[in-house]
Amino acid sequence: MAAADGSLSDNPRTFSRRPSAQASRQAKATKRKYQASSEAPPAKRRNETSFLPAEKTSVKETQRTFKGNTQKTFSPKKHSVSTSDRNQEERPCIKTSSLFKNNPDIPELHRPVVKQVQEKVFTSAAFHELGLHPHLISTINTVLKMSSMTSVQKQSIPVLLEGRDALVRSQTGSGKTLAYCIPVVQSLQAMKSKIQRSDGPYALVLVPTRELALQSFDTVQKLLKPFTWIVPGVLMGGEKRKSEKARLRKGINILISTPGRLVDHIKSTKNIHFSRLRWLVFDEADRILDLGFEKDITVILNAVNAECQKRQNVLLSATLTEGVTRLADISLHDPVSISVLDKSHDQLNSKDKAIREVCPPPAGDELDSFAIPESLEQHVTVVPSKLRLVCLAAFILQKCKFEKDQKMVIFFSSCELVEFHYSLFLQTLLSSSGAPASGQLPSASTRLKFLRLHGNMEQEERTAVFQEFSHSRRGVLLCTDVAARGLDLPQVTWIVQYNAPSSPAEYIHRIGRTARIGCHGSSLLILAPSEAEYVNSLASHKINVSEIKMEDILCVLTRDDCFKGKRWGAQKSHAVGPQEIRERATVLQTVFEDYVHSSERRVSWAKKDTANMSHFLLLERSCRQLLQHLKFLLL
Ligand SMILES: Nc1ncnc2c1ncn2[C@@H]1O[C@H](COP(=O)(O)OP(=O)(O)OP(=O)(O)O)[C@@H](O)[C@H]1O
């Protein structure tokens, strides 16, 4: 199996005494035979792993063991034995598997503790104080079951009802969708000449992903229940163009679309016109206006500006910066900048103020002021590449098998990595039903549920997975950044970032899929030792993460007898402490390798993707560093 750094673990995994010549010949033969034919029975490989009872070692030894970067052998004279282990001194040396040898040092994380920017989510202000149509208020109260406004809604809705352009920045999960949907619906239903469907779009909402388009469409539909003459519609890739054309021909008054699909229609559908457009909304504006969408946004703005001059423009995002609005010629007219920051945090002391006046932060540095939900606990763990996969698997077991009602989202950097890990976990973690381990919750014996979501899936399946995960109480969603922004996935308790995000802004949006609207949630960022610097980069953006040690994650394997070595089936192992954990981690890794090596296709899949991924990360990181350096030189 290729480790995340693309290195192949090439040693048969044994914990036995130094193998005899005959045994190592046999191990090599097994290995050759195994690699040559993808049909070799997986079980054969597992028998190679034979464990000897381990030494009892102190916790300190555990820490040293996991940190060690060379092969550790436990020989009595080499490490302090407690009195209870006195009788083990005569035990033979024990070799650890290659999983735990030749690993890079895990650096101490000396991250500065910074004061995170916080936002007050709720207010006591009620929606009925806004002077909205009574039917709209009753829909908000009875259909959406909401009565009081969040801070961003209280600050944004009145400004938008006055007809102003606005830049709205508020933390993830704080209610920005309603902050623009309510004013849009209120203003359209109040128009003197009643809107006709055939009038076409009065409001255009642009969002970066199909799932977010569906979600926003669902919210608008609910708000429009009392105003049936106003017709909403959604355009997104993967849906049938023909039916979209038909709906556009009949007329859509509130149009929600991804940029790419809208450009398709602007170029090919005659019936799309913007002469009556009153609202242009960019949700996740910094994402929509970044390089990826530039061409599409230009086509859309040209088409809109050609027909409509006077309109309200609204840009919203948890990571909106002044720089973003300069990026696109959206012809904002005297916009109101709404930033829901807890003023106590935002106050610069006199020294900082003086510095800022003399030397304002570089353009790309506005991330300092982005808020993170107060109820979100952020963690990081530094794991050698070879141990990354078993650590992830152990963490999934720890949270989703031994704890009740855990809903986890795991971010990967590519569709292929999502597919690879999805099929791997389905075939290994699910199939190892195993007897309930001691301490397992009754519900823990229910099977783990894995789902996956990425851009290479058919739209129908993407929508089905999104709906299923949104409505489930537990489960593990493996996904790419297609699910990183805007998606309101209820009751997500954990966000795991298996691959570091492309920027601190994407970090904020990924973790923002949990701890929404005041709920509690946690996040875990998995870094390789060479990526440990990322923690300081987060700290420079006032993001605090606390460390979880790798061994604290791997410990859970001792609770799950599914991953005991084959030999132990017959007799109880004497292994305890770090040795037992190492053995079980190695068995788990072997289970993974068996699965991968059982098909040539999977072997090349594993090599290609992780090699590309690490290559991509190195390339992307050097580009980012170059860009930062250039910015610094230009200032
Ligand atoms: N006033 C309110 N009272 C209670 N719940 C609300 C209120 N406004 C919004 N919500 C709920 O809060 C959750 C998050 O809302 P929304 O998705 O609009 O957040 P957001 O700020 O757009 O998040 P992101 O930045 O991730 O896109 C949703 O489930 C929504 O129904």
Image (cartoon, rainbow, N blue to C red):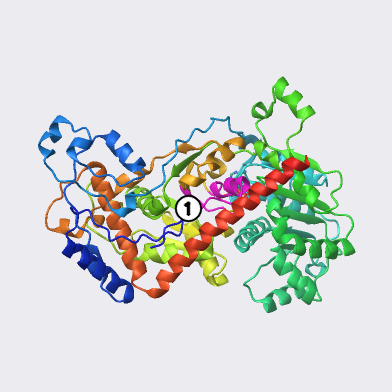
In the displayed structure image, the side of residue 46 where residue 393 appears, left or right:
right
Of the 4 image quadrants, the one containing the N terminus is bottom left
| Residue 49: quarter of image | bottom left
In the displayed structure image, the side of residue 503 where residue 87 appears, left or right:
left
Observer-nearest of 525 and 69: 69
Q: Residue at x 52, y 47 (%)?
A: 514
Relative image position of residue 79 (x, y in whole percent): 23, 35
Quick one: SS at disc 1? loop
Q: Residue at x 65, y 45 (%)?
A: 318
Q: Is residue 488 located in the magenta-colored stretch of the structure? A: yes
Observer-nearest of 206 and 369: 369
In the displayed structure image, the side of residue 446 where residue 537 appears, left or right:
right
Residue bounds of the magenta highlight = 487-513
Query: Residue farthest to the front?
Result: 21
Q: Residue at x 12, y 39 (%)?
A: 88
Q: Is residue 43 visible?
A: no
From this view, report whether residue 39 is shown above or below residue 445: below
Relative image position of residue 368 (x, y in whole percent): 66, 36
Asked if the residue at label 1 sits under 8 Å from ligand 1, the reply is no
Q: Is residue 618 visible?
A: yes
| Residue 149: quarter of image | top right
- The amino acid pointed to by label 1 is Tyr
Q: Is residue 252 located in the magenta-colored stretch of the structure? A: no
Observer-nearest of 321 and 204: 321
Q: Mark 1: give few (<14), some (14-19) or many (20+) Cα within 10 Å.
A: some
Q: Residue at x 78, y 68 (%)?
A: 197
- Which residue is denoted by mark 1 in the rendering? 498
In the displayed structure image, the side of residue 343 where residue 250 appears, left or right:
right
Relative image position of residue 562 (x, y in whole percent): 25, 57
Relative image position of residue 204 (x, y in whole percent): 76, 60
Of the 4 image quadrants, the one containing the C terminus is top right
Query: Residue farthest to the top?
Result: 350
